[in-house]
Amino acid sequence: MGLLRLLGDVRAWSIRRPHAVLLSRYFQADPVPRDVLLFQHRRPRFFRLLGVFCVAQAGFWAYLAHFGYTSLRDIKESDPGEMKGRNMGSPLWRTSFTVSCLSVGSLIMAAGLLFSRRSVSAVTLHAGGDAVTIVTAGVFGLGSSFTIPLRHVSCMAHRSEVPAMLPLKVKGRPLYYLLDKQGQVSNAKMFDLTVGAYRTL
């Protein structure tokens, strides 16, 4: 049954991409007898440094927000003729500055950690071709993995159509998982017809 679903996904993918080469005869002869590592691109050091950078940025902007909120003084206008520029210590300006700093720090932190959790380090197709395990870099390079049915994975572009990152959609999970094209694809034909195939989720 898993092989039949796989061939159905191949047909759908061929309709979506006319230039694809069908290899159904290959899969009929060899229905994935053992686990196959299809993709690998492990960079634990890079993601550790990315995690440290995100934490440092969050700390810096939090300190700047605290400094601005506690140090900016509200200078009352004693003489309208002598007042120059804006009163940066007024409640409105001080609150705006503090919120802006906290927002920037939070965005940098969230973007870095989200990229780490969506960057794929390895993809393994299990024996029989029914399931696939996706390993992500994880926070600070501490990889995490999950196993899902192959029919719940859809590649949104062919490897030849993207310059840097290959977007992978997983059913029931928000956003895309990213496969860096600098990674190693050990079996290009099997990758294109399994994980690299387009499916309607």
Image (spheres, helix red, strand yellow):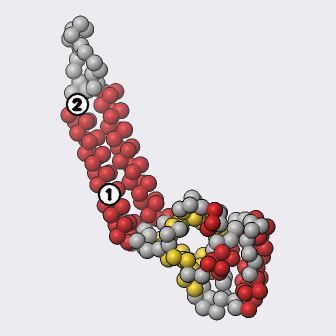
Q: Residue at x 35, y 47 (%)?
A: 105
Quarter of the view holding residue 80: top left
State the image coordinates of residue 174 (x, y, percent, origin top left): 57, 59
Q: Which mark is residue 94?
A: none
Q: Which residue is mark 2?
A: 72
Amino acid at the residue labelled 2: Leu
Residue 24 lies left or right of residue 154; in this view the side is: right
Query: Mark 2 or mark 1, which has the lower sequence index?
Result: 1
Q: Residues within 10 Å of mark 1 (few under 14, many from 20)?
A: some
Query: Disc 1 on helix, strand or loop?
Result: helix
Which circle, 2 or 1, is nearer the viewer?
1
Q: Are marks 2 and 1 in contact (CB under 8 Å)?
A: no
Quadrant containing the N terminus is bottom right
Q: Residue at x 58, y 88 (%)?
A: 35
Quarter of the view holding residue 48: bottom left
State the image coordinates of residue 86 (x, y, percent, origin top left): 29, 20
**Residue closest to the eye, 102 or 128:** 128
Residue 56 lies left or right of residue 152; in this view the side is: left
State the image coordinates of residue 168 (x, y, percent, origin top left): 60, 66
Residue 197 in view in this figure: yes
Q: Which residue is mark 1?
A: 53
Q: Residues within 10 Å of mark 2 (few under 14, many from 20)?
A: some
Count of residue discs: 2
State the image coordinates of residue 97 (x, y, percent, origin top left): 33, 34
Vertical placement of residue 38 versus 48, above or below: below
Q: Residue at x 75, y 77 (%)?
A: 22
Q: Residue at x 61, y 68 (%)?
A: 159
Vertical placement of residue 183 versus 105, above or below: below
Amino acid at the residue labelled 1: Phe
Residue 149 in view in this figure: no
Q: Label 2 to label 1, Cα distance in Å? A: 28 Å
Quadrant containing the C terminus is bottom right
